[in-house]
Structures are given as C-alpha cells and as structure tokens.
Amino acid sequence: MTLTISDLKVSIGDAEILRGVDLAVDSGHVHGLAGESGSGKTITGLAVLGLLPHGSRAAGRIELEGRDLLTMPPKRLNAVRGAEIAMVFQDPATSLHPMVTVGVQLTEHMRHHLGIGRKEARERAVGLLAKVRIPSPEAAVDRYPHQFSGGMRQRIAIAVALACEPKVLIADEPTTALDVTVQAGILRLLRGLCDDLGLAVLLVTHDLGVMSAVADEVSVMKDGLVVETGPRGQVLTEPSHAYTRALLESLPGDGSELPQEER
Amino acid sequence: MSPASASSSEPGSGTAAQGPTAPAPRGRTGRGPRGSRRPLARFLARRVAVALLLAVAISLVTFVLTNLVPGDPVAANLGQRALGDPAIVAQWRADHGLDRPLPEQYLLHLEGLLHGDLGMSQQSHRPVRDDLAEFVPATLELAGTAIIISLVLGVAFGVIAALRRDRPSDHVLRLVSLIGISVPTFWLALVAFYVFFFRLQITPGSGRIDPGLSPPPQVTGLYTVDSALAGQWDVFASAVGHLLAPALVLALYTIGLLTRFTRSAVLEVLGQDYVRAARAKGLPGRVVLFRYVLRPALVPIITVAGLAFGSLLSGTVLVEAVFAWPGVGQYAYKSATTLDLPAVMGVGLVVGLVYLVINLVVDVLYGVIDPRVRVS
C-alpha cells in the first residue's frame, strides 16, 4: 500500500471530527471516499497533507510508504507536500492564484522540490499542460487563470498537482464545481493519469455517480467513521451498511444502473 | 482643502471596491483573453491622461472656490486709511487683476499656470511660486517620511497581528492601532513635544535643523537629501533627528489604520483556497506569505493607504504648527486668514496635485499587483 491511514482521530476544540478512520490507497488505484457533507471526507484528505485547520489535533497513523506523516517534523513534511503527495481542490476558480501566471504556478514548486532551473521547469510546464490537454500549451503558460474556462482551470490545477511526479494524489471533489459535460472529461483524465503514472488517487466526492465511473475501491464515511469499504462493485451493488443503502437510494433517477435496495 | 477631496474621491472610488477576492468582471466583457500587445504601457498611458485632465479640473475648482469665499481681500490687505480712498482701492484691485470678470481672471490664471506663474502673494510680496518652493519641500519631507514610516510599520504590524491572531502580540497591536486611530494628532503632537523634548530631552526641538547649523545648498529642498548630496553629515544627522518626532506623530494615525486594514485583509486572504493550495504544494513559508498572502492583500491595503495619506496631508497643518515646522501648512493657514487669494490658490493647486499623484500611484499599483486590471 502506498498510503495507509489507520485509526486517524481529529478533533477541533471539543468537537471530534474523525473518530478512528482506516483507509488504504494503492498505486494505480482510485480510491473513492464518499459521504455527505460534514462526514469528515475533506478533513481526512487535509490531514494527509498536514493542512488541518488551525487549532485541530490529530492522532493515529498516516503512513506514506512506511513513513508516518503525522509525527514527521514540519520541515520534512513540507518536503513531502507537493513532491510526493499532491492535492487537487474543489473549485479551480479559487484554488489557483488569480494574480500569477499559470507558468509560475506550475513551476514554482517544481523548482523548489526538484531544484531545476527556470528553463527546464518551463519546458516541463509546457509538457504538463499538453498532458492534461490544454490547447496551445506554449502560450498558455504565460496566461492568467481567469483567461481559462472552469474545466481548463481544473486541468491546469491537475497539471500543477502532477508537476513533481507525486505518488499520491488527493482530489477533493474535483468535479463538483464544473458543468456535467466537463466532469466526464476531468474524470477520464484522472483515471488515465492514475493508470499511466501509477498514481495512488484518493478521490473525495459526495457524488456516487462520479464514484461508480472511476473508482476501484470505495469507502463510505459517516460521522467521522468509515462505515463501509470494499471494491466498487461490491459496495455499490451489495451495500452491507444501512447508510450506504440510504445514500444509494437518495440518487436521482439517473442512478438507474445502480440497483435500488428495499428498505 | 475642499478641492483636494473633490479630486481624490473620483479616481479612487472606481477601484476601491476591488477586494482580494473580487473577481475580474472586466475579464469577460473586455477585449478578449489576449488583451493588447503591451497592456501595461497602455494602462499607464490611460491613467496619466486621466490625471492630466483632472489637474486642469483641480485648477478650475481651486479658482472658483477661492473666489467664492466671502470676504474682501482688499479689506484684508489694505490699512484703514487706504480703504477710505477709492482711488487706492481701485488701483490695488487693478494691480491684482480683481477688476476683470471671473472667467477672464481664470483664463489669465490658467495661462500663468502654464508658464509656472502662480501670481504674487499679497502678504509676502513675493511670487507664490517662490514661497511654495520654500515651504512645499519641507512638508513633502515631513509627510513623505510619515508615509514611509506608516507603510512599513502599518503593514508589518498588520501581518504580524494576522499571523498571530488571538495571541498576545495580536492584542497588543490591536491596542496600539486603536490608540493611533483615536488619539487626535494635535494633542499627540503637543504631548510628544512636551514629553520628549522638554522633559526627557531625547528629541531635538522645533524646526528642521539645529539653530546653529545652516541649511544645506538647495537641490531638492529636502534637507536630508540635500545634506547627504553635499556630504554635510552633521546637517544630515540633525535633519533626520528633527524629522523623526513630527513624522512619527503624523504617522501614528495611518499606522493604526493600516495595521487594522492589513490584519483583516491578510486574514481574508489566509482563508482563500489558493493559499491552502500553495501550502499543499510544499512551498517555503516566505513564498506563501509574500506571493500568495501579501500580494493579494495589498490591493485593499493600498486603497486605504491612498485615502489615508490624504488625511495625513491635512494633519501636517497641526503638526507643523506644534513643531514650528516651516511647511506649507503654516503658509496655507496664514494665507487663508489674510485672504491672500493667489497664495491660497497656489496651495490648493499643490495639495490637489499631490492628491492626484497619490491616486495615480495607487491606480498604477493596482495594475502592477493585479494583472487582471490591465490584461482585460
């Protein structure tokens, strides 16, 4: 396993947000993390990067290839962030710096983590933009995020995440802010990158339709706990937990390919 | 000082609404994604053109307002005996161009301005231009130092307060900024002068340099710069010493204001997704702070700073009076009370132009900091 989370507990003030989460993501796999808002999906993703909100405490283990990220000194953790674990956020309109060119945002962490020069970083940036299928990547590096559409921006954000060739990619609701037609393209891209690069992808989403489209494994969270986990087919067709069934039933009509269980 | 405030509200208000999170509405409706070939140059040219138009408007407003002031300059300038003699009064009015219709007076005034002629002061019997050349640099030196001090300290304090939110240093800085905002400048000037000069004797007294020294040869009119240029380091030290206390007093209000605005602007940016994304990229803390936090936060900060510097200028009148600083504030006060209209107009014009320059700088900085302003 590339990324293993065991018995992760997070509390902010008196509130227990995570109450012992267990999760494992392997390279070349997309692990879908489902659950309603407030169930702790996003906090789980942020905990992996050590980006929990101010004043929160975390306990348990988060292992990246055997190294515990929770007890890692801040400096070493900062060297892992962006380099070995990268993140794609929900809304590309706000997760890219509006006043800095795409090129700078693609190269700044590359140059920092990999210690490469400006020219080489720029060439890589162009290559990355081509990889996520941004048209005319040579010109795109000198433009600003607001000059791209939402779907293009999310592709850029994915390119930024991939820049240092990380082992783990955490994608937090990467399609939620996008048009339905654009969603499919982003998901295909993520799936392809996962297969080609052997990425371990943790896909956080509340959308079971998204989940069924790309995930290999699925975990379902409720109230800070993983209530069900397993291969996609098993969880989505034969859910063992009442909450998973409730989630599946809450799907609108287009969930026809998913079986409706009786209460 | 009303002409100045009239000019400051116009260029400032259009951009004042831009917060760090404000989207770029012009990006969609503008000239398309590419923009023009050299967007920054075009942006600058447009701003300067607008500033020039506003400069003419300022001259008109100062002229009209000055002439609307109730009061008779003749009565203010001639003695009782002379006033009784209609011939002397008429002669005096003719000498000062006051017998002509107002529009003609304005055109003459404008023509004079183009030649750098601001008329004769009725008080000092010298060209207003010479008076201003003597007094304006003193004020610019004082106000400029205060502006630099307040920018450096205000922004630094605000950033520290935001990064250490709800910790002791934040509370201390909040108190400091509250004092800075609420204490009246004239009172603070008096207390500072009394405590630090009369009691503790750690600051030099009034004026721009020690009485025993002679001013450096005039190049810029700024004693610190001129003395350094001339290599007169004793004068330089004395000029800096005399400058610090009044500049700090003058700066305290803007320090307080900028601390508060910087704190809230930085806190707002800290909550942005792209800051979290920058941390997720494992960037060093200083890159996150300067590129991702401070740069967007500067947009609202410079908006406030531009407006605050306007009020700082009016504060110089009081500070100059207390510290016997021979600046334009004192000159303006004397001219206004004696209805020395050419001098009043000259001061109004200069103050208006300073406002104009401040607004131009703020507008240009928007474009430098936020490319969306110039690209689209």
Image (tube, grey):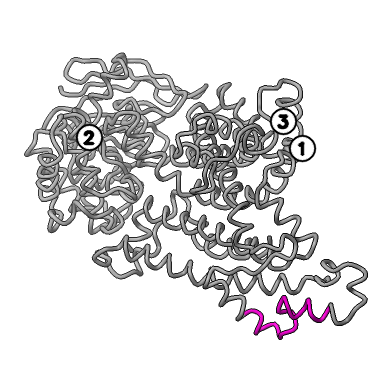
Callout 2: helix, strand or loop? helix
The reply to whether the magenta stretch includes residue A159 is no
Where is residue A127? Give x, y as percent: 9, 46
Q: Residue B213 carries which label?
A: none
Residue at x-position 88% and y-position 81%: B86
Quadrant placement of the N terminus of chain A:
top left
The chain identifier of the residue carrying mark 2 reads A
Nearer to us: label 3 or label 2: 3
**What residue sits right under mark 1 in the picture?**
B187
Q: Which amino acid does label 1 sit on?
A: Trp
Q: Can residue A28 be seen in this view?
A: yes
Mark 3 / mark 1, whichever is N-terminal: 1
The crowd level at tag 3 (other Cα within 10 Å; few <14, some 14-19, many 20+) is many
The chain identifier of the residue carrying mark 1 reads B
Where is residue A236? Give x, y as percent: 23, 39
**What residue sits right under mark 3 in the picture?**
B192
**What residue sits right under mark 2 in the picture?**
A109
Nearer to us: label 2 or label 1: 1
Rendering quarter of residue B150 = top right
